[in-house]
Amino acid sequence: MTNDNVTQHQAQEPETVTYAKLGSPMAIVDGVSFSGGDEWTNYGGNLTVQTERVFYPKTLEDLKVIVREAHNDNKKVRCVGSGHSWSATAVTPDYMVSVNGMDKIHKPVRDASGWTVTLETGVLVSQLDAFLRAHNPPLAVSSMVLPDVVRFGGILTMGCHGAGLNSRTLSDTITEMTIVNARGELVTYSAAKDPEAFNVACLNLGLLGIIYTATIKVEEMNTRLRVTDSYPTLTSLFQGPQAGLNLKARLLKNDSTEFFYWPFERFMQPDQNKNIWVKEWERTTEPAEDLKKYEGLPPMIDNPFFSTFQTGSRVMEVPDALHFPFGDGVTTVLDVGCAIKVDSDFGNICEAITEVVEKNWEFTTSMPERMGTAIEFRFIKASDKILSPAYDKDPDTIFCMINVMAASGTPGFEEYSVGIAANWIHKYNAKPHWPKMWEKVDGIVSYLRREYGDRITRFNRVRKSQDPTDMFVNDTWRPIFQENEL
Ligand SMILES: Cc1cc2nc3c(=O)[nH]c(=O)nc-3n(C[C@H](O)[C@H](O)[C@H](O)COP(=O)(O)OP(=O)(O)OC[C@H]3O[C@@H](n4cnc5c(N)ncnc54)[C@H](O)[C@@H]3O)c2cc1C
């Protein structure tokens, strides 16, 4: 690939965003800057680690230098993007690699199967959105994670997802990946070259090495999205003999659907909220509206965490529709989330929602400091990536990606949320979404090893060929991917 095909993206990173806290580069080894002895904290504030070094690479050669240094010094290596994961997947006390400076985006390419774009893994979602929007013709990723301040290394590695029933996980949009392995070699993964290794690379949890580039499918943005926000009662959606099938019909009609629930009808007032925010996206050829007219509207509900909520319907460009603020940004949040395979009549989902609303109410009202909680859920189609929590052989299987959340620092959230996750696991065979807080769930390692079973063996076969000395394995992944009998 020539330099003519590469855009060094100039987009400024937003200043108001809470990222993980990194150090400042202070020394250089073979042209790669690094800092030493920094305390790293993630976005949610639930993880802190004293690292020996944080590296700040800019080029492929830098990545190879870091791997060589780690090999010579017998150190573990974990990459970090915006630090928005709540599980300790990015954490190591040895060498962390901040990929934020790896932010080149290549010129999109069109072939018989559509458009693709190749990017380095430090590219922010907002940077790619802006780049694709300015392209002629305008392009977009059709289903995306909610925040645009996270980076592609993080969201592809962890199998992240949006809300579309016409889509799967973001790992399922990958057509090629290049990764620097523990020997310092750049390895290219594609379905044509080796389907099994490619499957593993697409959702690799950072265990194959340092991802250099990913090529993902993008779409021509010749439609917009009509976004409709409503506030129906929980009873009308989730109660009664036809509730599940009605919910299913509603979801199938939409391009995407997302639900947010907060427990108080009015903030810190005693009445339980009987309504739920439903956000529905439908493709349309109508022109996008000027969104300025909606700025500064008085809040419709009394809750600082969801102060942007307004009922109504408006047409937006795809990225504007997919990334929306939902509160005052008054706090960061903690999150436990799982994938639940949906029964054909959606009965298990109606049951799960009804139950979690009650458990959330009990938790939230048991102490004034617990007022900032919420429940969020979306639906996607199955992934064929063997480590996806939404993995299924039937591509039409639907998964509910469901989360309980609370403001960072909410007392007792860990105990409450791991209890919720354990219940979903017990009742629905749910699988935790890897970036969320799943590590403290009782018996989780043996459950995951049993459930992923042969898929762990297959994953390890590829992983060991790239990282025979476990350079990229940290304490989060070691218990799950250890090679003793499954
Ligand atoms: C407010 C909020 C909203 C969220 N919404 C969603 C959502 O809508 N959907 C969803 O699925 N998730 C969501 N998440 C989870 C989030 O998308 C994931 O945690 C994602 O991994 C964050 O990206 P990051 O850049 O912060 O990655 P980090 O958390 O910094 O890293 C994640 C993992 O990626 C690895 N990694 C990063 N770059 C590389 C590389 N170059 N090579 C190898 N490994 C690498 C790291 O080692 C780490 O293991 C949300 C999180 C927050 C805080």
Image (cartoon, rainbow, N blue to C red):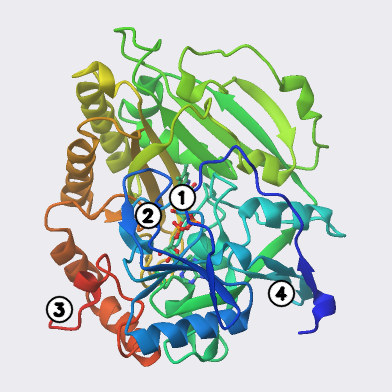
Label disc, if present, on residue 21 of the rendered structure: 1
Residue 169 seen: no
Instruction: From the image, tell me which residue sits under label 3.
Output: 486
Question: How far is the residue under mark 3 from the one under mark 2?
Answer: 36 Å
Depth check: give the residue in front, 25 or 1.
25
| Res 263 → quadrant | top left
4 and 2 marks in contact (CB < 8 Å): no
Task: Give the mark, 3 or 1, whose residue is nearer the N terminus.
Answer: 1
Instruction: Indicate whether 70 appears above or below 336.
Output: below
At a point 21% along the width and 18% down the height, the residue shown is 367
Q: Amino acid at mark 3?
A: Leu
| Res 83 → quadrant | bottom left
Q: Residue furthest front?
A: 27
Q: Amino acid at mark 1?
A: Lys
Label disc, if present, on residue 39 of the rendered structure: 2
Q: Secondary structure at mark 1?
A: loop
Q: Amino acid at mark 2?
A: Glu
How packed mark 4 is, by other alpha carbons closer than 10 Å (few <14, some 14-19, many 20 or more), is: few
Q: For marks 4 and 2, give the one nearer the viewer.
A: 2
At a point 34% along the width and 71% down the height, the residue shown is 94
